[in-house]
Image (tube, rainbow, N blue to C red):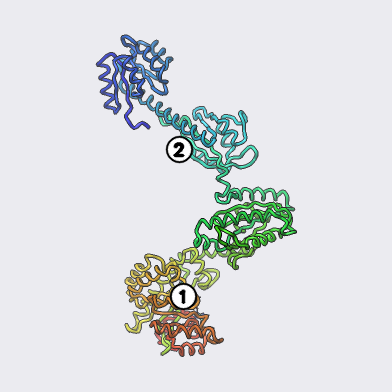
């Protein structure tokens, strides 16, 4: 606290005594001031320029006891410790001095070690007092500002003082609360109690600079309040905490309401829901529902029109929701609804419908909400349209707590979104089963990589002019221990969502390149096969991709031109600038690039010439269209000349019949892939057709 060294004032008429003591104290790092008598001493005291006084009792003129009296008139023992220096024989004087407010004494001849110990003890006490005073002042200040309650805990006697304000914050007065810390802990919510105790203990052990905790407390009226509690501990010279004091602030308001809309927030909503669920257990003829509402396309509005408009829209939506829930006459069957409307954050709102007589009321309420939201909002002079997807979970006795019913309402909301938005879905057991199956699959997927449950199959790509194999596309299969062989449609989307696709995709790429190396080693250098590998967007955007692939190819001795990476149009369009840069880096390595599933995405032919591409793979939906008539043919007809102009190779995907193979050949398509030629093959099967030089 004091950065300057402590200053000790030596008051003694004997010059030799003074100087000897002074030199030794200075050697210990203290600053020393010297005074021959009481008058000079008082100058130092008045100026507050010393931290401790060593005062000789026996002095001519004004003696030590008289001097002590003069000091104590100005400074208390807490402000300025005084250690009396006395001959051993003067025990009467010692008693007298102590009763007059001396802090301690040392006897002559001075045992320096003893003197030093007493000095440092006194200085430590003073420091403790000062920091306590400082913190008390700080808290008193804070308390005046925000109406805090104060507490002051004597750790030695284990009694605690609570200010009246402290008590009234929790609904108590005077002696209704005893002065023990147990009284306090008793009021803290049982879920928070141990944590608060731990935080206090951590501070007292010196592990934290101050104690600060946000926790729930039970008000006398039964409600839960949020308290912010702060404090500091004061230790004695040995470092043992002797006192701890601080403040308590009611932060319930900030904790439970949403800053933008003023609606209850998630915490408060959960609390109310919890209570309603408990209430229901005693009144089984009533039911409750949770509506989970998410605005459709809010992100687009927010991004395109700005956060200010976004916030205004959320505010307007919250007001409209509230008023439409309040007016009960719009839907005749819905009587006065008991509801709690809350904002979860972002564009998510929840509604608790309480005391429902009929579970159908929840659907009626959802319909009404959707109807009300369908009218445009006028925001900053602009008409803004929005709609909502709503998930509904109805109470049933299986629910143990609020989080569970919220989770199901949320799941139902996602279902509503995936069914095309602007609708409501009621949660049912099938949905839970789906969620569980998905969760299980996700866990399995993580484990599958470690257990080596993945394998690659290879589908030949045929050069149409001579029917020979030009290369293969590597396709993943998951050999699930109980479900058998699983196709990528089932697990690739999940792997993409969870980010596992990076590892999985890398496994597939490595495996495919290794296989390619083996096969090409047995062939003439110029009849090398090309390996097509699919790259998902997450892999494609990985900044280390180029380096990783380059290292892999060098390690395996595979020429880069033998590898062709397939990406989709949407991967490119997600961030066209970055995509072109990445494509150029890959091309510079010598790797070839293909656009996969062409025609299903943006189908914008105009950007094609800007991409460093080798190949277009026309999606199989267009090829299968060829046999049943016009549409597919059209696409193929427009794309073929364009691709030829851009010197791109074209692969027709999903060729299943001889007729389709014939048609695409007529359109000057050079390559084809599909069940008509071959299904994806195991490595062994693929090896067999390679060595037999099979041609179609
Ligand atoms: P894709 O890249 O379009 O792969 C071609 C898919 O069409 C393969 O399905 C293949 O078995 C199937 N197919 C081939 N010929 C025919 C045909 O004549 N008729 C029909 N109806 N289908 C045919 P598969 O193996 O189930 O793969 C599905 C998708 O999974 C792939 O579509 C690709 O997008 C993705 N995928 C597969 N392996 C990987 C991988 O290692 N990484 C990434 N990122 N995606 C992969
Ligand atoms: Ca592909
Ligand atoms: Ca494809």
Which dot, 1 or 2, sits closer to the camera? Answer: 2
Q: Is residue 594 above or below residue 284?
A: below
- Residue 278 is situated, as x and y percent measured from the top left of the image, at 67, 48
Label 1's element?
Answer: strand
Q: Is residue 463 above or below residue 309?
A: below
Distance Cα–Cα, label 1 vs label 2: 59 Å
Q: Nearer the viewer, residue 577 or 355?
A: 577
Q: Earlier in the sequence, mark 1 or mark 2?
A: 2
- Residue 460 is situated, as x and y percent measured from the top left of the image, at 44, 82
Q: Which residue is mark 1?
A: 475
Q: Is residue 615 above or below residue 98?
A: below
Using a 10 Å C-alpha cutoff, classify the residue at mark 2 as few (fewer than 14 neighbours), some (14 to 19) or many (20 or more). some
- Residue 83 is situated, as x and y percent measured from the top left of the image, at 36, 19
Q: Nearer the viewer, residue 37 or 575?
A: 575
Specify whether 304 is left or right of 561: right
- Residue 40 is situated, as x and y percent measured from the top left of the image, at 31, 16
Which residue is located at x 56 percent, y 39 percent? 250
Specify whether 316 is left or right of 139: right
Q: Which residue is mark 2?
A: 210
Using a 10 Å C-alpha cutoff, classify the residue at mark 1 as few (fewer than 14 neighbours), some (14 to 19) or many (20 or more). many
Q: Quadrant of residue 127?
A: top left
Q: Quadrant of residue 82?
A: top left
Is the residue at mark 1 in contact range of ligand 1, meaning its CB lies under 8 Å from it? yes
């Amino acid at each position: 606290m004091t950065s300057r060294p402590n200053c000790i004032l030596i008051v003694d008429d004997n010059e030799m005594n003074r100087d000897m003591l002074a030199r030794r104290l200075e050697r210990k790092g203290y600053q020393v001031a010297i005074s021959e008598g009481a008058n000079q001493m008082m100058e130092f005291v008045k100026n507050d320029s010393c931290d401790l006084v060593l005062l000789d009792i026996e002095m001519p003129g004004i003696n030590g006891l008289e001097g002590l009296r003069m000091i104590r008139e100005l400074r208390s023992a807490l402000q300025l410790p005084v250690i009396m220096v006395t001959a051993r024989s003067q025990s009467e004087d010692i008693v007298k001095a102590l009763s007059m407010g001396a802090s301690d004494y040392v006897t002559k001849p001075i045992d320096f070690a003893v003197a030093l110990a007493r000095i440092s003890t006194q200085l430590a006490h003073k420091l403790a007092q000062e920091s306590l005073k400082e913190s008390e002042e700080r808290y008193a200040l804070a308390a005046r500002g925000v109406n805090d309650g104060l507490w002051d805990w004597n750790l030695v006697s284990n009694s605690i003082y609570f200010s009246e304000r402290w008590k009234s914050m929790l609904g108590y007065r005077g002696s209704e609360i005893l002065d023990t810390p147990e009284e306090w802990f008793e009021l803290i919510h049982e879920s928070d109690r141990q944590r608060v105790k731990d935080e206090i203990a951590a501070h007292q052990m010196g592990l934290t600079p101050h104690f600060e905790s946000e926790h729930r407390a039970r008000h006398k009226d039964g409600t839960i309040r949020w308290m912010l509690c702060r404090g500091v501990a004061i230790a004695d010279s040995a470092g043992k905490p002797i006192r701890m004091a601080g403040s308590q602030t009611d932060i319930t308001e900030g904790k439970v309401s949403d800053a933008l809309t003023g609606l209850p927030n998630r915490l408060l909503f959960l609390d109310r829901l919890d209570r309603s669920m408990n209430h229901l257990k005693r009144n089984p003829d009533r039911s409750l529902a949770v509506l989970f509402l998410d605005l459709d396309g809010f992100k687009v509005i927010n991004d395109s029109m700005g956060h200010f408009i976004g916030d205004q829209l959320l505010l307007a939506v919250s007001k409209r929701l509230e008023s439409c829930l309040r007016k009960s006459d719009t839907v005749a069957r819905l009587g006065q609804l008991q509801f709690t409307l809350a904002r979860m954050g972002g564009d998510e709102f929840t509604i608790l419908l309480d005391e429902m007589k009929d579970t159908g009321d929840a659907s009626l309420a959802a319909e009404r909400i959707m109807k009300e939201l369908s009218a445009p909002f006028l925001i900053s002079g602009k008409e803004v349209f929005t709609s909502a997807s709503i998930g509904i979970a109805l109470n049933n006795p299986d629910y143990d707590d609020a989080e569970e019913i919220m989770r199901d309402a949320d799941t139902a909301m996602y279902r509503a979104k995936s069914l095309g938005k602007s609708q409501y879905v009621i949660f049912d057991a099938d949905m839970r089963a789906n969620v569980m199956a998905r969760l299980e699959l996700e866990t399995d997927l993580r484990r599958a990589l470690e257990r080596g449950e993945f394998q690659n199959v290879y589908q030949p790509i045929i050069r149409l002019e001579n029917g020979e194999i030009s290369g293969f596309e590597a396709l993943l299969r998951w050999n699930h221990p109980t479900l058998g062989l699983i196709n990528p449609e089932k697990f690739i989307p999940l792997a993409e969502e969870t980010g596992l696709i990076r590892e999985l995709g890398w496994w597939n790429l490595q495996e495919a390149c290794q296989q390619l190396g083996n096969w090409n080693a047995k062939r003439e250098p110029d009849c090398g096969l090309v390996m097509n590998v699919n790259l998902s967007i997450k892999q494609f955007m990985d900044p280390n991709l180029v380096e990783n692939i380059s290292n892999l190819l060098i390690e395996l001795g595979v020429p880069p031109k033998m590898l062709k990476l397939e990406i989709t149009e949407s991967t490119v369009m997600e961030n066209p600038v970055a995509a072109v840069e990445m494509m150029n880096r890959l091309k510079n390595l010598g790797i070839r690039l293909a656009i996969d599933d062409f025609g299903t995405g943006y189908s914008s032919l105009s950007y094609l010439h800007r991409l460093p591409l080798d190949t277009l793979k026309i999606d199989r939906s267009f090829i299968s269209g060829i046999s049943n008539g016009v549409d597919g043919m059209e696409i193929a007809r427009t794309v073929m000349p364009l691709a030829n102009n851009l010197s791109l190779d074209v692969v027709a995907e999903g060729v299943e019949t001889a007729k389709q193979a014939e048609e695409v050949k007529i359109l000057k398509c050079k390559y084809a892939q599909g069940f008509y030629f071959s299904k994806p093959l195991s490595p062994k099967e693929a090896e067999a057709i390679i060595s037999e030089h099979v041609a179609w």
